[in-house]
Image (cartoon, rainbow, N blue to C red):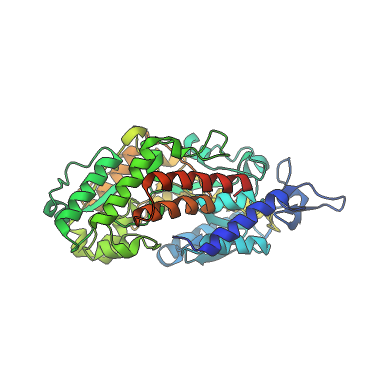
Amino acid sequence: MRTPRLTRTLTCIAVLSLAATGCGLSGGSDSGDATAGGCKVDKGNVGSGKLSGDVKGTITFQTTNLKKDFGDFFNGVIADFEKAHPGTKVKWIDDPGDNTFTSRTVADAQACTMADVINVNAPTATALTKAGYLLDIGTKDPAASKPFVPSFWKTATFADASGKSIHTTLPWYTGGVLLTYNKDLLEKSGVDPAKPPTTIFGLFADYEKVAKAADGKYFATMANPIWRIPADFDQMGIKVLSSDGKSAVFGDDPRTTQWVEWMAKLYKEGAMPKDSLSSSNDPSTLYSQGKVAYGSTNPSFVRFVKQNSPSIYAKTAVGQQPYDALGVASAGAPQYISVAATSKHAPVALSFAEFLTNAENQTAWCKDPAVVIFPTTTASLSDPFFQNVTGTDPFSQARKLVADQLKTASTNQTNLSPAVQNAIVAQVQLAMQGKKSAADAVKDAQEKANELLKQGS
């Protein structure tokens, strides 16, 4: 779970973007100055009109925990870009991607020192867009959408301070969603690994079987609901926010209370480690030790297990994540590439962001045998690499399963700010601890979410 400091920081930044003079995106003065999130920027970075200017200058490019495994690839992409654009220089920095990522990125933005091109997830993009720190790519380059699958391009929109949805990100890659599980632990618990459940509540019922059979020796999954909110709700077809995104409505669906009741029951019965309720840790370590039956839903997790725990990898299988009421798989929240509205060399930054995410570079990275990721461009998904997957090992099966899913997968996911997500999670945690009923937790979660939404959080 993210820290309280993060929630306070994001709340303050969102309020400032709505109320403080000079925050958000605004037009410039006669001198050509403008502001983006309170930082002075070139007038061309904000407002209407395409971005223009020479593609020359030095920019910073920030990724999240990629340099160790993919240094050669990204250094090659950078070299190709610099060769194609004489007079440019790209300095690559790699963030560790820990649970303070969003708060640190927000702090950099407030200090007007955020990287020119930055890899962001949906919560971070939500906060930065609302506060005016990201370039409106859809306006600054109306042709930016052309390479991308339309549904993925649609996910690249986030609300600005006025509530208007704008394209402040380029969809980079997606992980897809699947079930990863330890076949031996499931069989020991009376769960058939060959028959994955078709609903979220069916999956919860399997968790319960694991809890009863394990008797504390191993667990089904991790407890912190932050990993499941709002992903489970989306998959179940529970509407989380109103159509205009200004109010929370998840509490109006009785299945939300049933979901919380299940979570509280599973926690009480020992399906989850007690000390994982507020932990930000994912299942990676415990799964690799054979102490958790279900691993991460991210296909790249299979690669992690293969590299770090061969004995558990031999017991690992993958299956379809429950389609539930959605009727199709979720594509998973993509990773995005954004350009800082505060960039001193925005033409260079935008050009590099589009070069990095083009079909050629997306396809090349996805073909790396050390990664299980999937592209967001139409041309990349048509490549035989994704259409003709072979192999029976878990790694190959994960790639095949998700590649098939992406043909029909839904990308209509709910984007919650960290502040709103944390408010909901906190109430669910109280119910799981038995400190309030599921019904009261849902009611209070919706009220607190609405308070934050009214504040602009």
Relative to residue 314, is residue 152 drawn left or right? right
Q: Nearer the viewer, residue 219 or 368?
A: 219
**What residue sits 28% from the left and 50% below the top?**
265
Q: Quadrant of the N terminus?
A: bottom left
In the rendering, at what x and y percent does residue 224 appear? Answer: 37, 57
Is residue 195 in view from this perspective?
yes
Number of disc labels: 0
Q: Nearer the viewer, residue 227 or 341?
A: 227
**What residue sits 31% from the left and 60% below the top?**
283
Is residue 332 in view from this perspective?
no
In the rendering, at what x and y percent does residue 70 appear? Answer: 42, 62
In the rendering, at what x and y percent does residue 188 appear? Answer: 12, 54
Q: Residue furthest right?
A: 30
Q: Nearer the viewer, residue 53 or 310?
A: 310
In the rendering, at what x and y percent does residue 443 appear? Answer: 46, 43
Relative to residue 132, is residue 431 drawn left or right? left
63 up-or-down from 259: above or below: below
Relative to residue 157, is residue 315 drawn left or right? left
268 up-or-down from 378: above or below: below
Q: Nearer the viewer, residue 15 or 146?
A: 15
Q: Quadrant of residue 12?
A: bottom right
Q: Quadrant of residue 86?
A: bottom right
**What residue sits 34% from the left and 55% below the top?**
434
